[in-house]
Image (cartoon, grey):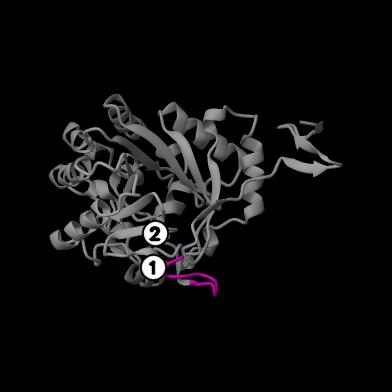
Amino acid sequence: MDARIQTLRNITQLAESGFVTSEERAALEKVAARYAVALPPTLAALIDRDDANDPIARQFVPGAAELVTQPEELADPIGDDAHSPVEGIVHRYPDRVLLKLTHVCAVYCRFCFRREMVGPDKPNALSPQALNAAIDYIRGNSAIWEVILTGGDPLILSPRRLRAVMQELAAIDHVKVVRIHTRMPIAEPSRITPDLIRALKALRKAVYVAVHVNHARELSEEARAACARMADAGLALVGQSVLLKGVNDTPDAMRDLMRACVESRIKPYYLHHGDLAPGTSHMRTDIATGQALMRELRGHVSGLCQPSYVLDIPGGHGKSPVGPNYLETVDGGYEIEDFNGTRHAYRG
């Protein structure tokens, strides 16, 4: 990758680089005025400019459809604010919290459920005082077993700042697991340096890195190498994907994505149904589509390739599994469906 190529951060730069047309510019300036734009060179290089429906471009290049907000869409679709006892903390489930360290990302997804809260015009990171209060909250709640670093993308922060946070968490005895949600290995794999990897280690804690990836092509040679550096250093990798229309909503695309993850030592964890974020209806499928895709995965590809298909219930009520059901109660027993669709009686 040419080091002189910079992240594209506005519509003018996207137009000059050939990713949007002059006819689109006026509408897209309105999109960019509301939602953050950033397309780093690693992802820009993956876009097929001859494909009007390219699945990489669809995720990261703004579109006029983002100006259309449906009545059911919400600024805070998963209800973070309702479960935020102090700035930077979301405590929705009893044994784990989110710690939102920053509102900045290396790339801004066009379907982001926090799109109203992230971007360079938002506060870049928790203030030292807010971070101390958030750590104090974790320290004071002994039921918290897992801390999930999120944002924004926490790996946008320097190794020095990340190391300081991990050292604070390492000193809290009841915290046993730290999970880090990021797109950085995909968006800017060169940032996954030995120094950053060392910063993510926490003494006597299990550290997991949840890599957000939605299409097999995102796992470029550079991205796979970045994931390998983390895995070789002892960091466990899990995968998070969002079900997106025109990106991964076909059996072939979903199969290729899950296999690419496992080949990169990323265990598929969640397949998220698209959240009701403003201006994202053109990217959401229906739940039936997701269930059909999960049926195509079951039995036809390795069990390592099976994520949990989940829906974050609007209003802050948490995730629930919405995958297909294979079991029915019949005449005091059960009927269970195999991966070929054949049903079998079961008494037990």
Furthest toward the top, the residue is: 232
Tell me which label, 2 or 1, sits earlier in the chain.
2
User: Residue 225 in magenta?
Assistant: no
Q: Amino acid at mark 2?
A: Val
Q: Is residue 307 above or below residue 63?
A: above
Q: Is residue 62 above or below residue 298?
A: below
CB atoms of marks 2 and 1 within 8 Å: yes
> Looking at the image, which is closer to me, 244 or 277?
277
Instruction: Give the position of the C terminus as an image quadrant.
Output: top right
Q: Which residues are magenta?
A: 68-77
Q: Position of residue 210 (x, y in %)?
A: 38, 41
Q: Give the number of the disc on residue 244.
A: none
The span from disc 2 to disc 1 (Cα, nearest Å) is: 9 Å
Q: Are there few (<14), some (14-19), or many (20+) residues within 10 Å of tag 2?
A: some
The residue at 30%/53% (across/down) is 141
User: Residue 74 in magenta?
Assistant: yes
The residue at 34%/67% (across/down) is 32
Q: Give the number of the disc on residue 28.
A: 1
The residue carrying mark 2 is: 20
> Looking at the image, which is closer to me, 311 or 252?
311
> Looking at the image, which is closer to me, 60 or 324?
324
The residue at 62%/41% (across/down) is 294
Q: Amino acid at mark 1?
A: Leu
